Structures are given as C-alpha cells and as structure tokens.
Amino acid sequence: MAPKIFLTRRLPEPAMRLLSAHCEVDLWDDAERPAPREALLRGAAGAAGLLTLLTDRVDAELLDAAPDLKVVANMAVGYDNIDVPACSARGVVVTNTPGVLTETTADLAWALMLAAARRIVEGQKLIEAGGWGPWHPMQMVGVDVYGASLGVVGAGRIGAAVLRRASGFGMELRYHNRNASPELEAATGALYRSLDELLVECQFVVVTLPLTPETRGLFGAREFGLMRDDAVFVNVARGPIVREAELVESLRAGRPRAAGIDVFEREPIGPDHPLLALPNCVAVPHIGSASVATRTRMATLAAENLVAVLAGRPPLTPVHAVG
Ligand code: GLV
C-alpha cells in the first residue's frame, strides 16, 4: 500500500507527479495561502510523510499528533520552522533543500546591493510621483559598488556565491563566520574578520546566516552604530537575525546609509511597515530563491527526499544524522 503523505501546499507539477507516483497524497490545496494550524495537525495525523514550507511550524505538539510520521521534507534550505531535536527524539527524519537555491539567492543579494546603493526603487518612485525635475549634478547620487569593500556574514554556500560574484566588481572581500573557512578563502580570496572588525571595515555588509539561538537578534543598534556612514546593509537570510525596530531607527539616522531587505521579523509585512516609509530601504517579499527553475528544483528535491525515506532509502539532503 502506498504511504500516506500530507503536503501543506500544492507544488509545481514535476514534484506533484513524483509524489503521486509513490504516495497517497493529501494536501492543503491552495498554492498561495498557508494551511491553518488545525488543517496541518489534521493532515499530519495518520501521515507517514509531511512536505512543509518555511511557514509551517513543526513542533512537539504536531509530532505528538502524528504518531506514524517518518519524514518531514522542508522545501527550503532554512529549517528554523522545525524543532529538529524533537524530530530526532522520535526518529523522524528532517530534510531541507540546500544547493539548488544557492545561485538564485546570491543573485538576489546582489540585486539588493545594487538597488540600495544606486537608489533604484527611490528613483522609480520619484518619476512616478512626477518629481523628476531638470538634471542636476547631485541628483539621486548613491554610492559605488565597483571597487568597494564587501563583507559577508555567514560562510555557507550562499555567502560563498555572493563573494564569487564580486570578482567583476573589483571589490575588497571579507567574511565572518563562527569558524574561519580555508576553503572559502582559497575560492574567493576573502579575508576572515571578527564581526565587529567586518562592520567597521566593510561598506557592503550582506547577511547569509541561518537563524539559530546564537544568531537571533545578532544585528541591532550597537552593530549598526559600528558601520560606516556610507554602509549598505543587506539581509537575505532570516528576519529575526536583525532587531528590526533598531534597523529602522539606524536607517533613519543614516547609518547604515541604505538597506536591502528580503526577510522580516514577522512575515508577511503590510504596507504600513515602518521600513517601507524609509526612502533608503529597498524591501522585497522573501523572494531570495524565487525563480521558476529554482522553486521547481526545490519542490522536486523535497519530494525526492520524502519518497526516498518512505521507500527505506537514505534521504538526499538530511539536516541531521539519522538512523
Ligand atoms: C528560503 O528562505 C529558504 O530557506 O530556502
């Protein structure tokens, strides 16, 4: 008999086909709205596999409601929505989708760096508001990316991909991570710095860390205060790594000078969010991995992980030691 699985969202067709070929699929059949908690708990009860998104909380309560569960396949590289120790304690395998979204997310980090540095969104809004008067020498001046210094906080795959892209921009490269990474240094020429040193030194600061108890709230008024007054701060990681109210105050005061933000403390944000009122902040709705090809690959990898575990094979990309 095919194992029962629950999907918290309809996925791109290749993933749906793979899952339907091997499993009895139940799903929250709405591609846009998340499954309410009760629907998730109901769907998980009796399921051997769960395919989750970063908006679905997998905790002890859910695991207790799902005694047959063998695998939680998260369609994201981050898995801060999942209580991994609680899953391990119950023998439930957790998988994520590393690798397939690296380059797409690094592209977005660069889009935000360039947009914030060169005031792209602010410029479009100026035109839309009928505010584009005669050309003048210091109209809409921003900061240069070419030849600037770039510091990446987090030395994983995405951090390395952000650094690699800098080679055409003649940048000075720095990175910070819990541990130094000789491989990253060899691949990119980036030099290791303490977080404070990096913040003092680098004009562009890009966050690519996972959200963990150690990184929650890592950036606040003190860290923004260390930055240069021409600094551009970019976060493509997770919102709660930044104390958002303190970022708003710091941007108002002009240090950092500009920011590009893909992730927020509580998502989704609405049009009244204070960051949107700041001309020096470019904000986008958590779209780091959002290309057609990458989202399709993420869904397919999550489906492959789920099918593998339910067939008794090792998962392709587990987040913890299993077995
Ligand atoms: C997206 O934010 C992810 O973690 O894949």
Image: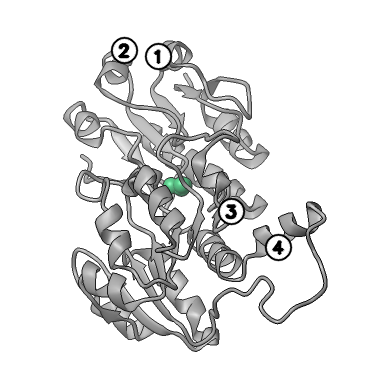
Is residue 300 in sight in this rendering? no
Q: Earlier in the sequence, mark 2 or mark 4?
A: 2
Residue placed under numbered mark 4 in the picture? 123
Q: Identify the disc placed on residue 65.
A: 2
Q: Is residue 209 visible?
A: yes
Q: Which numbered dot is residue 294?
A: 3
Per the image, label 3 sits on a secondary structure element best described as: helix
Tell me where residue 263 appears, x and y as whole percent: 46, 46
Is 91 on the left or on the right of 32, as rendered? left
Q: Which residue is drawn at 25% across and 50% down?
A: 215
First-in-chain label (4 vs 1): 1
Q: Which type of secondary structure does the marked residue at label 4 adopt?
A: helix
Query: What amino acid does circle 3 point to?
Result: Thr
Q: Is mark 1 on a helix, strand or loop?
A: helix
**Residue 33, position as x, y percentages in the image:** 59, 25
Q: Distance between the residues labelled 2 and 4?
A: 51 Å
Q: Could you tell me the amino acid type at mark 4?
A: Gly
Question: Disc 1 designates what residue?
Answer: 41
Measure the C-alpha gap from mark 1 to mark 2: 6 Å
Q: Residues at badges 1 and 2 in contact (C-beta under 8 Å)? A: yes
Pinpoint residue 153: horizontal percent, then vertical percent.
Answer: 32, 65
Pick whichever, 109 or 220, lies toward us: 220
Measure the alpha-carbon separation of dots 2 and 3. Answer: 32 Å
The amino acid type of the residue labelled 2 equals Ala
Residue 97, percent from left and from top:
44, 49
